[in-house]
Each structure stands twice: as C-alpha cells, then as structure tokens.
Image (cartoon, rainbow, N blue to C red):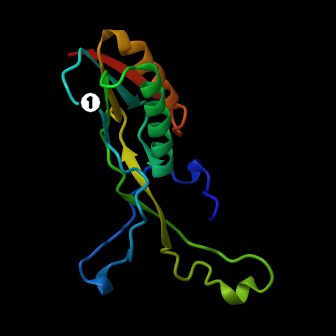
Amino acid sequence: MAKLRRARAYRSMERPYTRVSKFKKKSYIRMTPTRKVTRFDMGELKQYGYTLDLVPKASIQIRQESIESARQTSLKWLEKNLAKGEFHFKIRKYPYHILRENPLASGAGADRVSTGMARPFGKPIGVALQIDEGDRFFTVDVNEDGINAARKALKRAAKKMPCSFAIQQNKN
C-alpha cells in the first residue's frame, strides 16, 4: 500500500471542478474511493442532560483517515470510561470531497514515461471533508457525571486533526 501524503498537502479549502455524470464519457471522475468512515451514530440514542460539541477554529479540509482515527480514539475512551448506554456519539459532517493526485514518474527514463503537466487532472486517491469555522463536527451527549470523560474524548479526537478545535458545552 502506498504511503499517504502529509495532511498539509490537502488541508486548504479548494473546490476544483469534479463533474460526476451518469454518462461515463461526460464524467471527469471515473470512480470514487472507498469510504473509511462507515459509522456516524454510536452509543444509545436517548435524552441526555448535556451536549458537548467539537468545533473547528478555522475553515479546513480534513482527510477521511484523520476522521476515522479521531472517531476510533474518542469512542474507545468513551466506552472505557462510561458505562454502556450512558453516551451518544455522533459525527455531524460527511466526507464527500474527492481528492486527486497527478502521479509523476521519477528516476531513469522518467521523461519518456511521464506526461508531466500535459494532462494534470489526476486520479482519485481519497476523500476529504470540508468544514467551516464554527460548524459542529463531533457531538457527544452525556449526563452530568460523564462530562469529564466526554471532554477528554473530544480532546483526544482533536489531537488527530490538522487544525485546532474548541469544545462547546450546552445544557439540554
């Protein structure tokens, strides 16, 4: 498996032309990469006393690998420190933005193999999420005795992301 490029290569908010048509010849993107984030609602859905939200401090684009890593680490912390059925964890945004990369050959004879920038549209390599400043990203619903565990879980999730986040607490 190829190594992923650094997050800073994809974190700027840009919206390139990515036409996907039901007619294959008119479509620029021939396929969509598989989604790594498959679960968006975890825990038990019921009425809780408090809601904690993870909110970005800047508009940014986040790759699906970061989202899945943050989801796993925060969910593991919640399951370890809270009893079953004492929290509801939700991812509020869906990664839909297709990332492309133009592969360039390097080494001996690369000038005969590579097209360079002749056809630079690129092949789909991943999926990302575009999120604006102040949007709710992760939400954890807990009762009063689980606030500290939920706050710690969201802090752990924020460390997996390429920008800084704030945690907002609301009473239901």
Q: Secondary structure at mark 1?
A: loop
Residue occupying the far right of the picture: 108
Residue 44's quadrant in the figure?
A: top left
* 13 w.r.t. 157: above or below: below
x and y percentages locating residue 80 in the rendered image: 47, 24
* Circle 1: residue type: Glu
* Left or right for 126, reference 8: left
Residue 91's quadrant in the figure?
A: top left
Residue lying at 30% horizontally and 25% vertically, measured from the top left:
85
* Left or right for 125, reference 131: right
Q: Which quarter of the image is occupied by the C terminus?
A: top left
x and y percentages locating residue 152 in the rendered image: 48, 20
* 96 w.r.t. 167: above or below: below
Residue lying at 35% horizontally and 20% vertically, measured from the top left:
168
Residue occupying the far bottom of the picture: 112
Sort mark 1 into few (<14), some (14-19) or many (20+) by Cα contacts within 10 Å.
Answer: few
Residue lying at 31% horizontally and 10% vertically, measured from the top left:
144
x and y percentages locating residue 75 in the rendered image: 43, 32
x and y percentages locating residue 122 in the rendered image: 50, 73
Residue occupying the far top of the picture: 145
* 28 w.r.t. 3: above or below: below
> Label 1 belongs to which residue?
44
Front-lying residue, 144 or 66: 144
